[in-house]
Image (cartoon, helix red, strand yellow):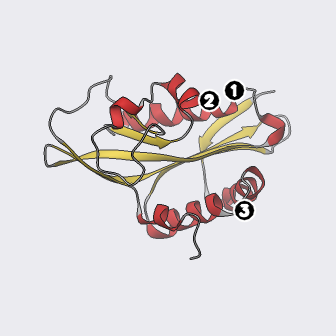
Amino acid sequence: MSIAIRPATGGDVAAIDALLRRAFPAEDEARLVQRLCIDGDMVLTLVADDEETGALAGMIAFSRMDVAIAGKPIAAVALAPLAVGAAWRRQGVGEALVQAGIAQLADAGAMLAFVLGDPAYYGRFGFAAEWARGFASPYAGDYLMALPLQGGAMPCGVRGAATHAPAFAQLGGES
């Protein structure tokens, strides 16, 4: 298997939507991605192509967040969702997508990435609940993790709000 990671294009929209609808038990993630794009809050979407079959093997999205430390806004993103097609799971596709996204965002100057997910999975990339503690968020807890993207440097000061894009508030609801 040979996988190529690249930025998503307009031509990927239908395949991404289909992947999200197959990968998750409800339509929430597919609707989340649609809303993030419509609202202009999507920062980065990467896809993984299976170079042998031409199929979309996976995708990852990062959206804009409003985050403040010491009363000053910092560049932060939310990782969500990450999806890998059933035929490509447990083969490193998700890991490759996360690593590529983190690298691109760090190069672009983002300071922090947040994720709401399994600590055992996301911890391997350096995400930790300790980095997210102290931020005011409706998702605060052991599953809200953060990762400093600039060489492990975390800005000093009192942690303020860590607010996801408005589309996240619609998860699990009708919109």
Q: Is residue 161 above or below residue 51?
A: below
Q: Amino acid at mark 1?
A: Gly
Count residues near mark 1 (Cα–Cα under 10 Å), then give few for <14, some for 14-19, many for 20+. Answer: few
Q: Which residue is mark 1?
A: 92
Taking the view exactly as shown, the residue that stands out farthest to the bottom is 175
- Residue 24's place in the image compared with 35, above or below, is above
Q: Whole-Å distance between the Cαs marked 3 and 1?
A: 24 Å
Q: Residue at x 55, y 63 (%)?
A: 171
Residue 70: in sight, yes or no?
yes
Left or right for 148, reference 104:
left
Disc 2 marks a residue whose amino acid type is: Ala
Question: On residue 14, which mark appears?
Answer: 3
User: Which badge, 3 or 1, is on the more N-terminal residue?
Assistant: 3
- Label 3 crowding class (10 Å Cα cut-off): few <14, some 14-19, many 20+? few
Q: Residues within 10 Å of mark 2 (few under 14, many from 20)?
A: some
Q: Is residue 49 left or right of residue 7?
A: right
Quadrant where the image shows the N terminus: top right
User: Do we see residue 148 in this rendering?
Assistant: no
Under mark 3, the amino acid is Ala
User: At x 56% / y 62%, what residue is drawn?
Assistant: 32
Mark 2 highlights which residue? 96
- Mark 3 lies on a secondary structure that is helix
Residue 25 sits in which quadrant? bottom right
- Which residue is at the front of the view, 115 or 94? 115
